[in-house]
Amino acid sequence: MLDKNGIAKRIAQEIEPGWYVNLGIGIPTLVANYIPEGMEVEFQSENGILGMGPFPLEGDEDADLINAGKQTITAMPGAVYFDSATSFAMIRGQHVQLTVLGAMEVAQNGDIANWKIPGKMVKGMGGAMDLVASAENIIVAMMHTNRAGESKILPACSLPLTGVGCVKRVVTNLAVLDIRGGAFHLAERAPGVTVEEIIAATAGELIIPNFVPEMRIN
Amino acid sequence: MLDKNGIAKRIAQEIEPGWYVNLGIGIPTLVANYIPEGMEVEFQSENGILGMGPFPLEGDEDADLINAGKQTITAMPGAVYFDSATSFAMIRGQHVQLTVLGAMEVAQNGDIANWKIPGKMVKGMGGAMDLVASAENIIVAMMHTNRAGESKILPACSLPLTGVGCVKRVVTNLAVLDIRGGAFHLAERAPGVTVEEIIAATAGELIIPNFVPEMRIN
Amino acid sequence: MAISKAVNGSSDACDGVKSGMTLMLGGFGLCGIPECSIGELVRLRVNDLTCISNNAGVDDFGLGLLLQQRQICKMISSYVGENDEFERQMLSGELEVDLIPQGSLAERCRAGGAGIPAFYTPAGYGTEVAEGKEVRDFDGKPHILESALTSDFAFVKAWKGDTAGNLIYKATARNFNPMMAMAGKITVAEVEELVPEGTLNPNEIHTPGIFVQRIFQGEGYEKRIEQRTVRSRETPSNA
Amino acid sequence: MAISKAVNGSSDACDGVKSGMTLMLGGFGLCGIPECSIGELVRLRVNDLTCISNNAGVDDFGLGLLLQQRQICKMISSYVGENDEFERQMLSGELEVDLIPQGSLAERCRAGGAGIPAFYTPAGYGTEVAEGKEVRDFDGKPHILESALTSDFAFVKAWKGDTAGNLIYKATARNFNPMMAMAGKITVAEVEELVPEGTLNPNEIHTPGIFVQRIFQGEGYEKRIEQRTVRSRETPSNA
C-alpha cells in the first residue's frame, strides 16, 4: 500500500520532458518532489506563476510569492508571473499538458466531485472546474477509500460534480485505474496489494486483466 | 472657412481635463497640437500607447514607437504601452472619453461610413468599427463636401457603414453640427461662413436655430 | 500632461462608497489584498455589500474583517475555505454566496472591463454552475454562456504605482488585481510605493492608468502569510 | 528546470510549415513584424497560405514580400492600405480578403489562445461585418457573436526573449504579438536578443514561455519606418 508520497512518486512517472503541469492542493503538490533532476518540466500554479520552485529557505519567505494552496514558494530560473485571466487562458486554452488533482469521488464514466458536501462543507471549486473542463490529460490523486472505509471509486458520483467525463486515470494508495468505456480498468497494483483487496475497496465497475503488474516505485 | 488645422483647433475646445482621447488618422491627429499647455489630457493610440507625445526630434525616431497612423511619435511622462487586446478593452469598455475620427459620409441618423468604396477602394476599417460601436462621445472631423463639391452630410449613407446611429457631433470646414432626433442641428458657423453657404453644402435635413453663433477660434 | 489620480489616503479614496454597493477586491487568499481599503471599509461601517473577491480572507484578516462586522450580504467567489465565520454565516443562511469557477471569475471581470457582455467557456458544464445558463456546442464540446461582471468600486493593491495611475504588481500578488482594476466603475488602487508620473518604465506597467480613478500610498502593510512553508537551511533538498 | 524552446535560426524555426496552412503574423504596419520568419517563408516557397495579420505590409516589405510571390490566397486583416499590389490582387479576385474590426481581430486571437470559442462584441453591428452572425441585445444594446481564431503556426517578434520562451516586447512593437503567440498551435518567436533562462525578471515578461514552442535570435533587422514624422530641432513645439 502506498502512502501519500508513494502516490506522488507514481504520478511523477507519468510526466514527460517538455510538459507544463498543474498540481492541485494536497497529494498533487508532492509530485513536484519526485521529478528527476535536470528534467525539463515546469509547474504552473493557477494563482499566477509558471516555473514554481521548492519552498523557500527559512527566513526567505515572501508574502507576495505563494502557490494556489497559499503556501510560500520560490521561482525557478525561467519563471514568469501573470494575472489570473492569463493563467486560466493557459489552462482553458490547453497549453498545460497535465493536470493532477485530488477528489472526493470519481465515477466510472470519468465524472469527478471534489468541491462541495451539501449542507456540510462548501469550500468552493477554486480553479478545479476550469481545469477539469479544459485539460486533455487529467490524473486524480487520492486515497481509494474515505476515513469510514467507503470506496471513493464509484458507479456514479453522489456529490455535486466538478466536471463530467473528464478523468482518464486515477492513482490511489492501492492501484492505478484507467477510465474508458464507462468502467475502471485495473492497470497496476500498489506494492504488496492484492487484486482482491482492490476489488473489495472499489464500488464502481472494475475490469481486471489477466495479469495486473505491481507498480515500480523507486 | 476653416482649414484642417482650424477644424482641429475647434475640436480641441471640446476636450475637458481628465479625459482620455482617441484621435483617428488625418485631421483628428492634428487635434493634439491645440491642447492648452498643462491640461491633464492623455491621448490613446489603438496600436498600444496611452500618453502619446509629439513627433520625435530629428534623429530620435524609433521604429518601435509609432501611432495608429504608422507615424513615429514619442511618449509623454506617465505613458504606458500595451497590447492590442488591452487597447480595445479600453475602447470597448468605454474607458476612453472621446473619439475623434474622419469620415467619408455622415447621415442625419448618426450613421457613419469611412472604410470602403465598393469596387474601388478597400483599405479596411482598422479600429474604427470598434471605436464607433463603443464610444459614448464621438466627434467626426471632416470637410463638409468632397473634392467634387458634393455634400458628405447626408440624409442616409450610400457607402458601407462603419457604425449605426453613433455620431453625436460633426465639425467641418464650414460648421459645427449636432445630430439628434434624426436630423442635423446647426450649432456654429465657421468664421466668415454664412448660414446659406452651409445650407447649400448640406444634403441631409438641417435644422437651423434663430441665432447661429460664429465659432470662436483663438 | 498625464491625468493625476493621486489622493491623500484611504479615506479620500473610499469617498462615495455606500451601503448596498457591489465591490470588487483583488487578491488571492491574503496575497495582494487591498489591506488599507478594507480597513477603511470597516471604519465606514457600510453594509449590505456584495463583494466580488476570489476568496473571503481568514477569520481575523482580509475580508474576514468585514464578515465579522456583518457588512457583507453576498459574496461572489471561487474558494472560501480557511474562514470559519464565513462558513457559519453561509450555512446559517445569513450570507448569500455565489461560487464561480476561478477562471470564469477572472474572465468575467476582464470581460466587464473590456466591454464584452458575455462569452462561452467549458468550465462548469454539467455541474451546478451551469444551472439556468445557456449551453452551446463548439467543435462538438459543450460550453456555457457566462456574463460580464462589473462593480461600483474596485479595490486593488499594487507594489508600485505612479500618479497617473499606472500599476506594477509584485510576483503572485498580481492575481485578480488587473482584471478588477478594469471592471470597477471607480477603481481605487493602493500601492506600497507611489512615485511621480514618468518614473515607471512604460514598458513594464501591468495596469495602465486609464483603468484607475484614484491611487494612494498605503501604510502599515501587514502582508500576512497564510501557509508559511519553508525548507530547513540544514537539509539540502531538490524539491 | 525550464523547458528550452531555443532553435538555431529561422530555418529550424519554420520546419513543418506547409502550403495551405493558416499562419498568424504579429505586427502593426511594419512595427513589430517577424522579419526573419517572413524571409524564411519566402525562401520556403510555401503557398496557398491564409495569413492572419492586422496589416499586409507594404509592396516590398513585410507581408508584401509574400504577396509579391503570390504565396497568400487569403488575408484576414483589419487594414490593408499602403499596399498597391495587395489592392490589385484583391480587386482582381486573385486574393480573398476577410476584413475584421481591429479590436475584434485582437480579441478573437486572444480567445483562440484562451479556450474561449466565442464572445459578444458591439463592434460591427449594423455593418457588413455582422452579416451572417448572431445578433443579441445585452443591456438594450445590440452585439454580434464573434468566434475564436487559431492558426497552424504563429510568428511573433519580440525585443528580448529567454530560452524558456518568455518574451518582452518594446514599446508599440508589442501590438498583436502577445495574442497571436497564444493562438498558434506552434508559435515561433524571433527576438533581437536571446538570453539564458533566469536572465529576465519574471515580473517584467509580457508573453509567458508556455505560449512559445520555438525561439531564435533574428539577424539583420531592418525595422523599416512607414511614416517618418519628426520635429525640427530648431523650431520648439508644444505639439
Image: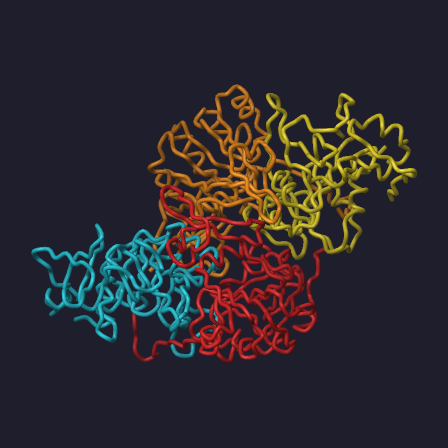
Chain colours: A cyan, B yellow, C red, D orange
**Depicted C123 relative to depicted A63: above or below:** above
Residue A217: x and y in percent read: 17, 66
**Depicted C8 relative to depicted A47: above or below:** below
Q: Is residue C82 left or right of residue C117?
A: left
Farthest left residue? A210
B156 or B161: nearer the eye?
B156
Q: Quadrant of the N terminus of chain A?
A: bottom left
Q: Is residue C77 left or right of residue C4?
A: left
**Depicted B1 relative to depicted C52: above or below:** above
Residue at image point 75% right, 23% down:
B147
Farthest top residue? D92
Residue C43: x and y in percent read: 64, 78
Residue D118: x and y in percent read: 47, 44
Q: Is residue C178 left or right of residue B211?
A: left
Residue at image point 50% right, 58% down:
D204
A176 or D18: nearer the eye?
A176
Residue D126: x and y in percent read: 61, 35
Q: Quadrant of the C terminus of chain A?
A: bottom left
**Depicted B99 relative to depicted D162: above or below:** above
B75 or D112: nearer the eye?
D112
Asked where in the image residue C16 lies, by quadrant, the reply is bottom right
Count of labels in the image: 0
Asked where in the image residue A157 lies, by quadrant, the reply is bottom left
Asked whether residue C205 is in view, the answer is no
Asked whether residue C93 is in view, the answer is yes
